[in-house]
Amino acid sequence: MNKQDLLKDYKKQDDKLCLSQVLDKIEITSKREKIEYTDFLDMYQVSLVEGFLRKNQFKNYKLYGGYEDAERKVLITYPEKFDDKMLEKNYNKILKIVRVTLPDEEKGKYSHRNYLGGIVKLGLRREKVGDIIVGEDGADIITLAEFAEVLKKELPSLTRFENAKIEISEIQNLRKLELKVEETTIIVPSLRLDNFVSDLARTSRNKAGEIIAQERVFINGQNETKNSKQVKIGDIITIRGKGRFVIKEFTGTTRSGRTVVLVEKYV
C-alpha cells in the first residue's frame, strides 16, 4: 500500500492527516489480524473517509457511532475472517455510555450545549466523545470505552453535575429518546442550497455561501460545497453550529414565484 499515491489528490493537510491515520489502522488490521478503530470523526470527516474508502475499494470496515443516525462515528477496521456477529460482539470493547441522571429539581434544565460545554470546559478531548443524547432527566454521552472512566470521574467536578448520578453502561443500553421537532415555513427564491442555508441559518446569502465554502453544510450526511446544489423533498440538511433540518414539503408558490417550504427542525 503506497500512502503517498493514495493521498496525492488531497490538498488539505488536515484531510491528509485524517486519511493517513485511517490507512495506518487498515495496515495494522491487515498485518496483525485484529480490530482497530479511530477516535470519533465529525460529519465532515465521516463523509471524507467514507468517500476515500469507497473510491479506493477498501472493504472490511464500518463507521459506527452507537446508533443508526449518529453524527459522530468511529471507523472500525476488521480482519476478513470477521462476520457481522463477530464485529457486533466487539462494540462494547470500543464504545461505552456515560449516563448522567439529574436530581428531580434539575430535570429538564440542561440542553445539549450544556453537556458539551461542560466537557469542553474540563479540557477533555472532543474526539474521545461521540453524540450526546439528551432527555428530560439527563443524558447518555457516547464515548470511547477507554475514556469512559475519565469522563465519569471528571463530570462531577462541574457545579451543574455535582448532584447528578453518573454511571457507565454498555453501548446497547443507549436510551432511544424520541427526537423533538418543530415545524416552520420558509420562503426561498429558488431551490439552490445557498437559499436554504441563508434562511435556515438566518443569515445573508453571501454569508450562507461562506458557510457552505467552510464545509459546514451536509445533505443526507454528505458534505456539500456547491451553492447551486438543488434541494429536494426528503433531504436532511445539517448546518454545523445551526442544527439539522428535514425538507418536508413544497407547499406552494408566492405571487412573485418564490417557493414556500415546510421544514422540520430537530430541537
Image (cartoon, grey):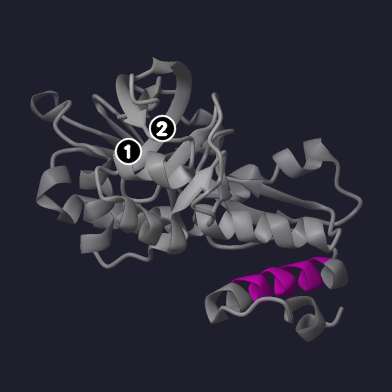
- Point out the residue furthest to the right here: 81
Callout 2 crowding tier (Cα within 10 Å): few <14, some 14–19, many ≥20: many
Percent position of residue 28, x then y: 78, 72
At x 46% / y 50%, what residue is drawn? 217
Point out the stretch of residues depicted in magenta: 18-29
> Which residue sits at x=52%, y=37%?
170
Pinpoint residue 90: horizontal percent, then vertical percent: 69, 46
Tally of marks: 2
Quadrant in the rendering for residue 124? bottom left
Apparent side of residue 164 relative to residue 16 in the rendered image (left or right): left
Q: Nearer the viewer, residue 258 or 107?
A: 258
Q: Is residue 17 visible?
A: yes
83 displayed left or right of 252: right
Query: Could you tell me if the residues under marks 1 and 2 are in contact, i.e. CB atoms within 8 Å?
Result: yes
Residue ID for mark 1? 200
- The percent position of residue 91, horizontal first and vertical second, equals 64, 44
Left or right, 128 with respect to 38, comes to left
Q: Residue 192 appears at what percent x and percent y?
A: 48, 42
Q: Is residue 10 magenta?
A: no
Single out the residue that lies furthest toward the bottom.
Answer: 4
Mark 1 and mark 2 lie on one chain; the one further toward the N terminus is 1
The reply to whether residue 141 is in sight is no
- At label 2, which amino acid type do we have? Phe
**Three-letter amino acid code at the position of disc 1:** Leu
Q: Residues within 10 Å of mark 1 (few under 14, many from 20)?
A: many
| Quarter of the N terminus within the rendering | bottom right
Q: Secondary structure at mark 1?
A: helix
Per the model, the C-alpha gap separating discs 1 and 2 is 8 Å
Of the pair 39 and 32, the residue shown nearer to us? 39
Determine which residue is flagged by label 2: 245
Question: Where on the picture, by quarter, is residue 108?
Answer: top left
Q: Main secondary structure of the magenta part?
A: helix
